[in-house]
Image (cartoon, grey):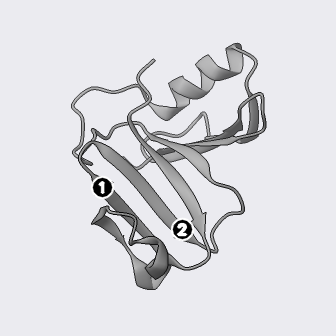
Amino acid sequence: MDLGAFSVSLSVRDIEASRKLGFTAFGGDPAQNWLILKNGDHMIGLFQGMFEKNMLTFNPGWGANAQPLDSFTDVRGLQRELKAGGVEFLTEADESGSGPGGFLVLDPDGNPGLFDQQR
């Protein structure tokens, strides 16, 4: 199961204060209250006022530098595999769709995981 690019998405109170963590801006728009930061192979997302808890984020179809991958497991395929394994879903991707889509799961300890396919 290839989950795509991985980052930690942090729910922050002040995006400008939080961007001083030693990472370089890589994407996003602070005016829209979100910013993607990178330090070497490590990536984090800062999100101000968008969700309550920090979460693990997976981007099927993207490599570590946000480059499109030629081959990847579609988010709907990942959803089917996780469902078969008994994972609890908070939201689901439309199984009849294609292209962009996503779903949100909880791990056994209640930590959210976002699977967000952009293409």
Considering the numbered disc 2 on the image, is that residue within a helix, a strand or a loop?
A: strand
Residue 42 locus on image (x, y percent):
33, 45
Q: Label 2 sits on what residue type?
A: Phe
Of the pair 87 and 102, the residue shown nearer to us: 87
Q: How many badges with numbers are in the image?
A: 2
- Sequence order check, earlier mark of 2 and 1: 1
Badge 2: residue crowd in 10 Å (few <14, some 14–19, many ≥20): many
- Name the side, left or right, on which 64 lies relative to 112: left
Say the numbered circle drawn on residue 38.
Answer: 1
* Residue 64 falls in image quadrant: top left
Residue 58 locus on image (x, y percent):
47, 40
Of the pair 30 and 93, the residue shown nearer to us: 30
Say the numbered circle drawn on residue 56.
Answer: none
Indicate whether 33 appears above or below 45. Answer: below
* Residue 24 falls in image quadrant: bottom left
Considering the numbered disc 1 on the image, is that residue within a helix, a strand or a loop?
A: strand
Foreground: disc 2 or disc 1: 1
Residue 2 locus on image (x, y percent):
41, 23
Indicate whether 112 appears above or below 70. Answer: below
> In which quadrant of the rendered image does the N terminus lie?
top left
Indicate whether 82 appears above or below 105. Answer: above
Residue at x 56%, y 59% (from the top left corner): 10
Tell me how far mark 2 sits from mark 1, CA to CA: 15 Å
